[in-house]
Amino acid sequence: MLIEDGENSRDCAFRKPEAFRCCYSAAVERYPAMMRAPELGLQEQYVLLAMDVTFTVDHIAFDTKWVDIGVAATVLFQLWRNGRVSLEEGRVKPRGALYVGQTDLDALIVRLVQNDPPFESRGINSWLLRMANAEPHKAVLEGLAHKGILSRTKRKYKLVLPEARNRIIERLQRVIREGDPADEQTAALVGIADASRVLETGELSGDSSEQAARVEALGKTVVPVVAAVRTAVSEKKLRDSLTYFYYLGGGTLVALLVAKCSS
């Protein structure tokens, strides 16, 4: 069905993102029940939150280089809360089929399970890092494009419905800065975003001790996942540093350090 409003119509979305926003706003006024914003999964909210929108670019950028660890954490949290895995003794133990309900992301999980059988049962940190290596944020971006929140040209994505991101920011600002109560998903989003360094920059950054205390308290509600994210980020930083040092000519020392850490 083509939704029209005077000279504007929804087919213009394929030509100009600005026109899409105009059409969308007009359609919301005329068809509020039909044009409600699509529901977003935790992983989609996290990716939108992590986007860097401080300057105009022709493609998506992120405020943190740990975004894939964060996406992996949102997946693990959902699997855990839905009873599909347990997180006992620091390990991920499957209890059923692993899926979160987003086609592209679920396909990625299936590939990981098929190509790397130990993936299903690993230490939590190892699970996060293994999934992060598969760059799951790309699957989430594709899902957001399917929902009309992003546009896609070849392999580049652009935010065309900033209202979706703004609603997330506004909700988290009320929780973090004003102390509004948070549901479990919001608490998980805050905890994972904080652990993966998303809250250090952007609209939610701040050095208030009261704000920091609220963020810490929210993170404690999802302790197994948030703690693992912090460890995974630290481990990834160490690996990246060792790799950089190796290419600078310190290969022998790096090999000794790796052997020492593995013993």
Image (cartoon, helix red, strand yellow):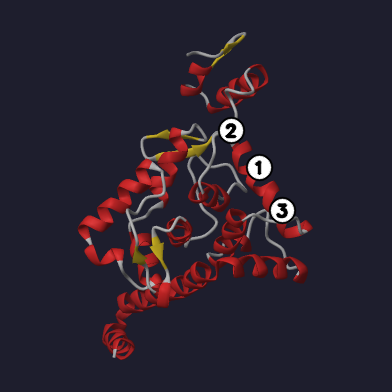
- Give the residue pinned by disc 3: 173
Q: Element under label 2?
A: loop
- Give the residue pinned by disc 2: 37
User: In x, y percent, where is residue 241?
Assistant: 40, 76
Q: Element under label 3?
A: helix
- Sequence-first disc among 3 and 1: 1
- Sequence-first disc among 3 and 2: 2
168 and 122: which one is in front?
A: 122
Task: Tell which tag, 3 or 2, sits nearer the viewer.
Answer: 2
Amino acid type, residue under disc 1 in the picture: Arg
- Give the residue pinned by disc 1: 167
Residue visible at 72% across and 56% down in the picture: 181
Q: Are marks 1 and 2 in contact (CB under 8 Å)?
A: yes
Instruction: Classify mark 2: residues with Cα within 10 Å, few (<14), some (14-19) or many (20+).
Output: some
Q: Would you place residue 58 above or below residue 116 in this image?
A: above
User: In x, y percent, where is residue 205?
Assistant: 68, 60
Q: Element under label 1?
A: helix
User: In x, y percent, where is residue 160?
Assistant: 55, 33
Which of the numbered marks, if any, corresponds to residue 84?
none
Amino acid type, residue under disc 2 in the picture: Ala
Amino acid type, residue under disc 3 in the picture: Gln
